[in-house]
Image (tube, rainbow, N blue to C red):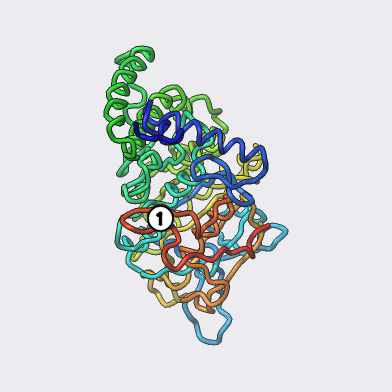
Amino acid sequence: MMNYSRRAMLRSTSCGFGYLALQALRGQAALAEGSGKVAPGTGTPQTRARAKRVIFLCMSGGPAHLDTFDYKPQTLKKKHPGSVYKFQQRGESGLWISELFPELSRHADQLCMLNGMHADTGIHAQSFLQLHTGERLRERPSLGSWINYGLGSENENLPGFISLNTSKSTIYSSAFLPSIHNGTPIGVNGEDMSNATIRNVSSEHLSLRAKRRQLDFVQMMNRGHLAQRATEDRLESVIESMELGYRMQTAAPELLDISTESEATLERYRVGQFKKQIGTCKPTDFGRQCLLARRFAEAGVRFIELNHGSWDQHKNHRRDLEANCRATDAPIAALLDDLKDRDLLKDTLVVWGGEFGRPGLTPENGKNETGHNARGFTFWLAGGGVKGGHVHGKTNETGARAVEGKIHFRDLHATILDLLGLPPNDLTYYYAGRQHRLTGPEGGKVATEIFA
């Protein structure tokens, strides 16, 4: 008779659910003992965690850093590229913020500016992919999938990773990670966010009891299939996904229904108020996205990505930038208000940024066109254990390149993972003959200078 270990037996019977339960129990035991060293996916950080979840405000297209958060006044005798909008020092920290963000400016003392960001390329698709996955050319697991793999969801009835108003599957793909860590898209390719939902999760053609019986029948066949393939992790992942889909039927529809929110709340978030495209600024109902993000964060979703585009304003720079800022300013401020008021901001890391920045305009020269700048641009973070009212890094006098406190995307990824209690360069997955990690072969440097 084949000599099975108890762990092998649990893996090879009952769809591997016994093994999954064992892993969860081991994680709980490690937490109780205070060791903090558990396998990925058990929900327990492996190092000190300052944050429990992430909300990523993705501004695709390349936000103009010099006209938003990286103030470059005219200090030389000759006019040079710089900021063409007025800036004001805000909050007790005196953070310089553009006039284009009057509502967000109220949160100056919660913002941690990263003015030394830089990337490898000024090509949209490649830099956008690298921002999300660490790779420029190949599909790899996204940041949200790595976090979900490392920590799992805080709510067993909801996915650990949700992507709102998404357009490219590569930004929420789990790639070679088990498919249970794939992001769940809500609102795809410009779909009206007021109608966007998690597809096939709220069907009413059968009662919940009948659906359970139907799923039990399918899973019985899956068990028979898996019994002959005890090491088939992909099949186990599919089984897990089907069970999660069933459980989501009771939790997800209620969270997506914002009719229970007050009129005052809907107004603060500007839900449904930006319905017309202005230049490159698309009507993505960013207010609804921010409100849903708050609801998902409260419910225990680990990683939530919001998407607003496009900031790709080559021509009519001023018109398009103003429209993009107007569409996102109040909703972001409302989100930060609610996270703070509900005592969630302290362990929710909010991240704002895009795939690169833009060269500055030269005042009074009559030109209104910008290009791409991957050598220096701005991200900001809030909550989740980072310093508020703080500026880290800087660009040169024209904002053309980062010169101090430089942070590459892999360093940003490493910093986010570390804030969540995950070892950034040791969170790996074996695939195609070698170990892979989000921070790539070079590894990422954690920006501990920004930690509170």
> Residue flagged by tag 1: what amino acid is it?
His
Of 307 and 142, which appears nearest the observer?
142
Q: Is residue 376 above or below residue 428?
A: below
Hey, which residue is sitting farthest bottom in the picture?
Answer: 77
Q: Is residue 386 left or right of residue 277?
A: right
Determine the residue positioned at 46% across, 63% down: 409
Determine the residue positioned at 63% across, 40% down: 31
Q: Quadrant of residue 240?
A: top left
Please count the marks in the image.
1
Of 4 and 121, which appears nearest the observer?
4
Q: Is residue 370 visible?
A: no
- Residue 348 placed where, x, y %? 59, 45
Q: Is residue 144 visible?
A: yes
Hey, which residue is sitting farthest right in the picture?
Answer: 92
Which residue lies under the disc numbered 1? Answer: 132
- Residue 307 placed where, x, y %? 41, 48
Disc 1 residue crowd, few under 14, some 14–19, many 20+, Cα 10 Å: many
- Does dot 1 land on a helix, a strand or a loop? helix
Of 447 and 258, which appears nearest the observer?
447
- Residue 429 placed where, x, y %? 41, 52
Determine the residue positioned at 33% across, 49% down: 175
Q: Is residue 146 left or right of residue 276?
A: right
Q: Is residue 31 left or right of residue 442?
A: right
Q: In which quadrant will I find the C terminus?
A: bottom right
Q: Is residue 241 above or below residue 360?
A: above
Q: Quadrant of residue 392?
A: bottom right
- Residue 375 placed where, x, y %? 44, 73
Q: Is residue 58 above or below residue 182?
A: below
